[in-house]
């Protein structure tokens, strides 16, 4: 098992034959595409922010190619797997195995959801899409400063995030403004 | 406690509540699952291997695993199975090493989230029948199991589930939150409403706040989970609490300190002064609307005068600790007002109203009078109290609103599964391996619908 670490999800290296999108890149891509198409920094920032809340490993992007998918487990746990292993041919070459792994790489839930094309179900059939609670009935929002958490009366013209004071605005500009976009 | 459970002495049903955050697993008929463990693989920074996490209930003598900056891989994304290979590996460890069961001689009761896509159901059936060779399978959703458990017992104040065998289950877990009406043990799926927020998003939000304000903890999932579980609470009055949270010295009843692991003497973080952390409980909740207005005005003034207060919040890196104040309640606040945080979704109270309104009007009063809270997020102190305060004004005056948090919101669903697995007609409800092989996944799955 080996890992390739990478710090920027959007910085793909095309020279690697086993290159595939990291799970993070895949996860962000559809929303990113939508946001970029909107060419609106605020929308863009808000969408990317929501993605960040569902992310597992925030700091580091990672691609992984399993040479031996069970490498992490005790020998004890291998009993059930033998049948599965013997189902295939003999031990595959590393390359074939890496290719196979790349092909059956896990997809994100949003990708699986798109494939299920739930929009085409008849209107009376309950589905994941229809269960979404929908927008709040009230349009009023309380605004909290994204720096310190207290009531915020100012909005950043570039990204739409809130701040309460000159001090928090400076911190915002230095550390957060458009952070989720970059 | 509930010694009157009709549990038989022997069971060969594995009951598996397969959450996005935690796996709860054990044998049908038991009161509690024998194993609770995170549903993920971990790679501690000291290791090159992905390992299965130790069960939550490890023996006190065992060397605690240092999870500082550990990377995480989860088989579930937004509550749904996206990586069957990873799930299979974790289950193999679970069945062999932790539960020590023989799947080919056992049935499986498995929880699956509502509205699971057919492709995911197919992948699940393959693991259950083709990889593990279970004898038979029953798939259940969490709300119906939480309902079943509560319907089987009577609480200290009488029956929780209404006489009409109806309840409104609010399941606020790791990946999302569902408001689900349950009628005679079946979830009315056409009426279910979902908020796309759960414990995972809250932990990530808290990570952001702490990282921006004090010290970078963006890679510290387990540490921040601990901070969240030990220090967060639900505000009953946000303007008032924001006001209290910016006071100085002992007047600030919400400030508390969390100590980071040093990797030498302690590998886990901890609350520095548990007594200090409990001071929030002394805040009384008798504020009238006019007082709130006054607070709000006062707050705006303080805005100007107390700006320098922020400076004191900067973390002392030499001490390896950080302070929390308003983060403690602004994080759970997300569930009640997602819109404040940029999510265009209704909050929990409105979510419940929409779920009830999607049911037949005859059910409305009985649903409001038996609202059951389950899932780890409902453990935040004052969660039920806040929900009642928000829900009551949205419900007709002549309807009762009764909200009860399950005795153990993390295990409640599993216990319902255990109960169902030990009922006499359980085997008849299952799909057998032979039926699966003959009919395939899609046709077998129809049996679990209603
Ligand atoms: Zn501020
Ligand atoms: Zn900005």
Image (cartoon, grey):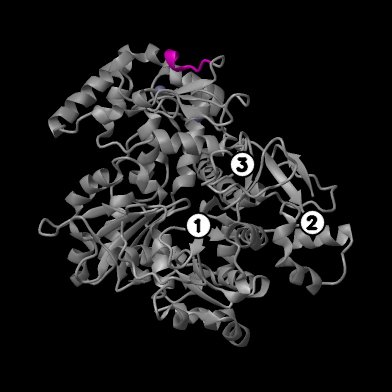
Quarter residue B153 falls in: bottom left
Marks 2 and 1: which is nearer the front? Answer: 1
Same chain for the residues at labels 2 and 3, yes or no?
A: yes
How far, Cα to Cα, is label 2 from label 1?
30 Å
- Is the CB atom of the residue marked by disc 1 within 8 angstroms of ligand 1's nearest atom? no
Query: At which x and y percent is residue A161?
Result: 45, 32
Q: State if disc 3 and disc 1 touch (CB < 8 Å).
A: no
Residue where numbered disc 3 is placed = A57
Quarter residue B287 falls in: top left
**Chain where mark 1 sits:** B
Query: At which x and y percent is residue B94?
Result: 60, 59
Q: State if disc 3 and disc 2 touch (CB < 8 Å).
A: no
The structure residue drawn at horizontal position 82% and vertical position 53%, both measured from the top left corner, is: A18
Q: State if disc 1 and disc 2 touch (CB < 8 Å).
A: no
Q: Residue furthest left?
A: B398
With respect to residue B391, does B443 lie above or below?
Answer: below
Residue where numbered disc 1 is placed = B34
Q: Residue B184, can we see it?
A: yes
Q: Secondary structure at mark 3?
A: loop
Q: 10 Å neighbourhood of mark 1: few (<14), some, or many (≥20)? A: some
Quarter residue B4 falls in: bottom left
The residue segment tinted magenta is B311-316
> Which callout, 2 or 3, points at the residue further toward the start of the chain?
3
Residue B307: say if magenta. no
Same chain for the residues at labels 2 and 1, yes or no?
A: no
Q: Which mark is residue A68?
A: 2
């Amino acid at each position: 098992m080996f890992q390739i670490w990478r710090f920027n999800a959007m910085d793909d290296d095309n020279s690697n034959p086993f290159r595939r999108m990291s799970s993070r890149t895949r996860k962000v891509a559809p929303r990113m595409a939508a946001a970029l198409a909107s060419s609106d920094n605020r929308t863009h920032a808000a969408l990317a922010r929501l993605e960040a809340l569902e992310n597992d490993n925030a700091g580091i992007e990672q691609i992984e190619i399993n040479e031996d998918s069970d490498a992490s487990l005790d020998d004890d746990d291998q009993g059930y797997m033998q049948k599965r292993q013997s189902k295939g041919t003999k031990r595959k070459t590393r390359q074939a195995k890496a290719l196979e792994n790349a092909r059956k790489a896990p997809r994100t839930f949003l990708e699986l959801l798109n494939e299920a094309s739930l929009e085409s179900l008849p209107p009376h059939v309950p589905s994941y899409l229809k269960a979404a609670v929908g927008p709040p009935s009230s349009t009023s929002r309380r605004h909290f400063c994204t720096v310190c958490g207290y009531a915020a009366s100012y909005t950043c013209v570039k990204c739409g995030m809130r701040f309460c004071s000159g001090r928090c605005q400076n911190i915002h500009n230095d550390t957060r403004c458009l952070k989720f976009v970059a | 406690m509930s010694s009157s459970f009709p549990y038989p002495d022997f069971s060969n049903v594995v009951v598996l509540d397969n959450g996005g955050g935690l796996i709860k697993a054990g044998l049908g008929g038991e009161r509690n699952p024998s194993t609770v463990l995170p549903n993920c693989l971990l790679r501690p920074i000291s290791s090159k291997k992905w390992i299965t996490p130790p069960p939550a209930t490890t023996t006190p003598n065992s060397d605690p695993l240092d999870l500082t900056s550990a990377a995480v891989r989860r088989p579930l994304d937004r509550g749904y199975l996206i990586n069957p290979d990873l799930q299979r590996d974790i289950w193999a460890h679970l069945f062999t090493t932790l539960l020590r069961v023989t799947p080919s001689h056992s049935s499986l009761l498995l929880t699956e989230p509502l509205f699971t896509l057919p492709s995911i159901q197919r992948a699940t059936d393959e693991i259950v029948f083709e990889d593990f060779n279970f004898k038979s399978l029953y798939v259940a959703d969490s709300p119906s199991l939480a309902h079943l458990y509560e319907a089987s017992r009577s609480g200290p104040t009488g029956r929780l589930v209404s006489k009409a065998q109806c309840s409104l289950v609010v399941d606020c877990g790791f990946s999302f939150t569902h408001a689900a009406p349950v009628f005679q043990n079946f979830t009315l799926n056409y009426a279910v409403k979902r908020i796309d927020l759960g414990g995972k998003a809250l932990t990530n939000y808290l990570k952001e706040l702490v990282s921006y304000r004090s010290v970078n903890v963006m890679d510290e999932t387990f540490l921040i989970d601990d901070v969240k579980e030990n220090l967060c609470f639900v505000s009953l009055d946000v303007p008032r609490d924001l006001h209290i949270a910016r006071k100085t010295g002992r007047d600030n009843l919400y400030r508390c300190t969390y100590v980071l692991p040093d990797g030498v003497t302690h590998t886990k973080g901890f609350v520095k002064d548990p007594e200090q952390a409990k001071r929030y409980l002394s805040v009384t909740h008798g504020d009238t609307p006019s007082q709130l207005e006054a607070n709000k005005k006062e707050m705006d003034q303080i805005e100007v005068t107390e700006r320098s207060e922020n400076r004191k919040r900067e973390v002392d890196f030499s001490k390896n600790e950080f302070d929390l104040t308003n983060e403690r309640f602004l994080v759970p606040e997300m569930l009640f007002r997602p819109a404040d945080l940029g999510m265009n979704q209704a909050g929990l109270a409105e979510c419940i109203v929409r779920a009830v309104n999607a049911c037949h009007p005859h059910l409305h009063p009985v649903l409001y009078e038996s609202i059951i809270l389950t899932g780890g997020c409902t453990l935040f102190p004052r969660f039920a109290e806040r929900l009642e305060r928000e829900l009551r004004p949205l419900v007709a005056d002549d309807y009762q609103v009764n909200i009860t948090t399950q005795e153990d919101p993390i295990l409640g669903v599993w216990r319902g599964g255990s109960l169902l697995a030990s009922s006499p007609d359980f085997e008849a409800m299952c799909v057998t391996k032979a039926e699966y092989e003959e009919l395939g996944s899609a046709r077998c799955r129809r049996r679990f619908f209603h």
